[in-house]
Image (tube, rainbow, N blue to C red):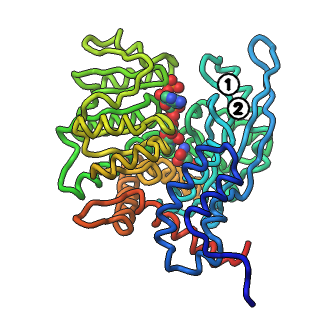
Amino acid sequence: MASIYDRHVDLERFMEGVKKRNPGQTEFIQAVQEVAQDIFAFIEDKEEYHEAQILRRIAEPDRVVSFRVCWEDDNHNIRVQRGWRVQNNNAIGPYKGGIRFHSSVNESVLKFLAFEQTFKNSLTGLPMGGGKGGANFNPKGKSDAEVMRFCQSFMTELYRHIGPDTDVPAGDIGVGAREIGYMFGQYKRITNRWEGVLTGKGMEYGGSQMRPEATGYGAVYFLRNVLEHAGQDVEGKTAVISGSGNVATHAAEKIVQLGGKVLAMSDSGGFIHDPQGIDQDRIDWIKHHKTHTRGRISDYADEFDGATFHEGERPWHVAADLALPCATQNELDESDAKALVENGCIAVSEGANMPTTLEGVKVFHDAKVMYAPGKAANAGGVAVSGLEMSQNSERISWNHERLGEMLTELMEGIHSKCVEYGEQDEGYVDYVKGANIAGFKKVADAMLAFGVV
Ligand code: NDP
Ligand code: 2IT
C-alpha cells in the first residue's frame, strides 16, 4: 500500500525536525547535528535504516526523568535543586553514563551527553546502553556534610529509576569518589541491597582498579594510537591540557610517562603556563590541591617559580604539538582551533565530551590535524566502568596491571573501528566519521532486530 509518509527524509529536513522538537536545546541539537551529517551519508543507500527511522529514534531519549532535590544547608536554609536522569537508549545493554553536578546542568546538556554516550558505549564493544544524569547543584564551597545531604536526597529519588541491569550511573564533572560514596551508601540503605548499581566506587566497596585513571590514560592511549597510525609518537612532544580535574590530571600524568611535556592546564578561572613542564610532582600537587584542598589552579603560579596564571583565559594560544581539551563542552572554538593550527599543533585528543565547537572541528579537518573526538578518545572511562560491572557481577576483582592491559586493548579496538569507517584518501583518518558510523551501526542493527519498539 502506498504511503504519503516520506520515510527517506534528507539531512536538512531531519535537522529541522530535531530543532523543532527540542526548542532552545542548543547542546543537544549540536550533538545530533555532528552525528547526523555522517550517518546520513552512511545510510544513503541503506533503505532499512530509513524505513525503521533508526536515527530519529536514537535522537529521542527513551525517557527523561526530572525531579526535585530538596536539602538543608549548614545554616539550616532549605535549598531546592532540579535533578534529572536521561535514559537515551538501551538497545545493547543497560543504560550507562555519568552524573554531573554543576550549576550549568540543564536538560539540553544531559540529553546531549546521553546521546553521545550511546555511541561511545557502543564503540567500547561492551554491552552498555547510553544515559546521563545530574543536577544544577554547585558543589564548590559546600561542606562535606552539605554535599552528603545533597547526594542522599538526590539518590532518594534516583534509586527507583536505576539498577545493575537497568541503569548504572557513574561520575562526571563535580561527581568523584566522595559523591559516589555518599550516593552508593544511600542506595544501599534504601534498597538493602549491595549491588553494582554505580561505578567509580571506592576500592574498599567494589570499585575497580584503574577506573580513576581510565579516562585520562585512555585519551592518551588513543592519542598514541592516532600518532602511531601516522608514524609518530608522544615522546618529545609538548602538550596543552584544559581542566585540572580527574580526566585532565590523569591525561597529564600519562603524557609525562610517555616522555611528553605538559605546558599548560586550567580550571574555570583561567590557565597556568609552566614553560619548564608540569612534571609528576607538580601533577600530584594539582591533584591534591583540586581534590582535597578544593583550591584553585591559580595557586599553582604562587607555588612554582616560572609559572604564570592567565585569568579568564583558555590554554589554546600556548604553542604546543598536542592539545587535550579535558574540561567541558564548547571550550575550544573556531578561533582557538585556528590559533592551535597556526602554532603547529598536529593532534587533538578530547578527554571532555564535545569540547570543540562544530566550527572548531572544521578548522582541524581542513588543516588535516589529527582530531580524535571525545566519544572515541574518552571512552576508556566508561569502558573500565563496564569492567567494574563485570567484576561486581562475578564477585571478583582484577589487579591494576591486568586492567591496564585491558584498557590499552580496548582503546586499540576503538581506534581500529574508527580507521575502518573513517579512513580517507592519502591515509588521513576522519575520526569523527569513523566513531559515528561504528558507534551507530551496532546500536542500529540491534534496534532493527527488535522491530518497532
Ligand atoms: P572534574 O569535575 O574532575 O573536573 C572538571 C574540570 O573542568 C575542572 O578543572 C573544572 O574547573 C573544569 N570545568 C568544569 N566546567 C567548566 C567550565 N564551564 N568552564 C571551564 N572549566 C570548567 O570532571 P572530570 O575531569 O571528570 O570531567 C571533565 C570532562 O571529561 C567532562 O567533559 C566530562 O564529561 C568528561 N568525561 C569524564 C569522564 C570521567 O570518567 N570522569 C569520562 C569521560 C568523559 P573548576 O574546578 O574551576 O570547576
Ligand atoms: O562521559 C563519560 O563517559 C563518563 N562520565 C563516564 C561514564 C561511566 O559510566 O563511567
Front residue of this view, candidates 291 and 101: 101
Count of all numbered marks drawn on residues in the image: 2
Residue type, mark 1 in image: Val
Q: Are marks 2 and 1 in contact (CB under 8 Å)?
A: yes
Crowd band around label 1 with a 10 angstrom C-alpha radius: few (<14), some (14–19), many (20+): many
Q: Secondary structure at mark 1?
A: helix
Q: Quadrant of residue 343?
A: top left
Amino acid type, mark 2: Cys
Given residues 225 and 242, the one toward you in this image is 242
Seen at 49% across and 16% down, the residue is: 295
Instruction: Confirm or reject: label 1 Cβ below 8 Å from ligand 1.
Output: no
Secondary structure under the numbered disc 2 in the rendered image: helix
Looking at the figure, which quarter contains the C terminus? bottom right
Determine the residue positioned at 40% across, 31% down: 242
Coordinates of residue 19 in the picture (x, y in percent): 65, 52
Relative horizontal placement of residue 426, taking residue 215 as reference (left or right): left
Say which quarter of the image contains residue 351: top left
At 46% from the left and 41% from the top, the residue drawn is: 355
- The answer to whether residue 108 of the structure is visible from this angle is yes
- Within 10 Å of the Cα at label 2, are there few (<14), some (14-19), or many (20+) other Cα atoms? many
Q: CA–CA distance between discs 2 and 1?
A: 6 Å
Of all residues, the one furthest to the bottom in this rendering is 1
Placement of 196 over or under 124, stated as above or below: above
* Residue 260 visible in this rendered orientation of the protein: no
User: Measured from the top left, where is residue 265 in percent x and y?
Assistant: 37, 27
Would you name the residue on which mark 1 appears?
147
Q: Which residue is mark 2?
A: 151
> Compared to 96, does 446 lie above or below?
below
Does 423 appear above or below 258? Answer: below
Q: Residue at (75%, 34%) from the top-left corner?
A: 82
Residue 22: numbered disc: none
Q: Which quadrant holds the N terminus?
A: bottom right
